[in-house]
Image (tube, coloured by chain):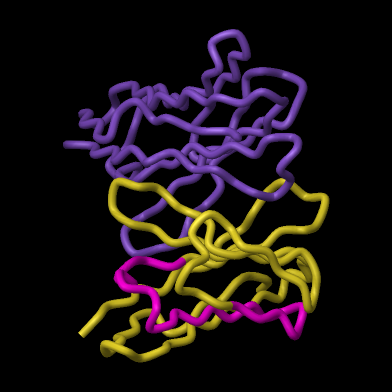
Chain colours: A yellow, B purple
Amino acid sequence: DGGITQSPKYLFRKEGQNVTLSCEQNLNHDAMYWYRQDPGQGLRLIYYSQIVNDFQKGDIAEGYSVSREKKESFPLTVTSAQKNPTAFYLCASSTVGGETQYFGPGTRLLVL
Amino acid sequence: AQSVTQLDSQVPVFEEAPVELRCNYSSSVSVYLFWYVQYPNQGLQLLLKYLSGSTLVKGINGFEAEFNKSQTSFHLRKPSVHISDTAEYFCAVVAGTSYGKLTFGQGTILTVHP
């Protein structure tokens, strides 16, 4: 089955710690995205990538970093600079030239 | 820049009643419009989309939406809801000049009561 997988489903971060969220897709999509979801605020774009080895900041990139070394993978690191990391994180992908994004099941990040 | 406003944060409704979830957008250029549904602790699933052509768009699970350019609206409707439609619904827009960058509304929680 083609789709997007995110792991882990739940992630706990200690203060001062960097954590990495995984996103993998087997849809052969060139473009991938990371969103943050907070209650009552909808989804906000963190980073996006339209091609391997290239990515752009979204609306709320501060405190986050990404890499795109493979077409299938777009990991997100939540750094210690992100002071309010508790949220639900969603990864998505689309074709470049395609307007529809397909979403993974999400990772919930909690701070200890 | 584009923006999306979902006019109701919560909509309670009884089973088999009709429902309308309201969405307004603003953009200075042409747009593509989407409705997504999210069940608790899950990702988003595409319900329907408007790209061009007929302004009445039909989606999955019996939902439909109408694009109204003059009122900059894209309201979601279903003539008869089921308990299983209880979820959060998001309206989203991509402006023609900001390809791939979805802007989401704040979400509307639809609760269907027996």
- In this rendered view, identify the residue nearer to me: A44 or A1: A44
x and y percentages locating residue B53 in the rendered image = 77, 21
Decide whether the magenta segment is chiefly helix, strand or loop: loop
- Given residues A83 and B70, the one toward you in this image is A83
Q: Quadrant of residue A29?
A: bottom right
Quadrant of the snapshot with the C terminus of chain B: top left
Return the residue found at the far left.
B114
Q: Residue drawn at (48%, 86%), measured in percent from left and top?
A: A20
| Residue ID at (78%, 58%) | A95
Q: Position of residue B83 (x, y in %)?
A: 27, 42
Residue pictured at 60% horizontal, 29% vertical = B58
Closer to the camera, B54 or A85? Answer: A85
- Quarter holding the N terminus of chain B? top right
Answer above or below: position of B28 versus A23: above
Task: State which region is magenta.
Answer: A66-89
List x then y, in percent, for residue B87: 33, 47
A106 shown above or below B5: below
The quadrant holding residue A55 is bottom right
Instruction: Examine the image and state in which quarter residue B107 appears.
Output: top left
* Image-based side of A64 in relation to A49, left or right: left
Find out whether residue A48 is within the magenta segment. no
Residue A39 in picture, x, y percent from top left? 28, 53
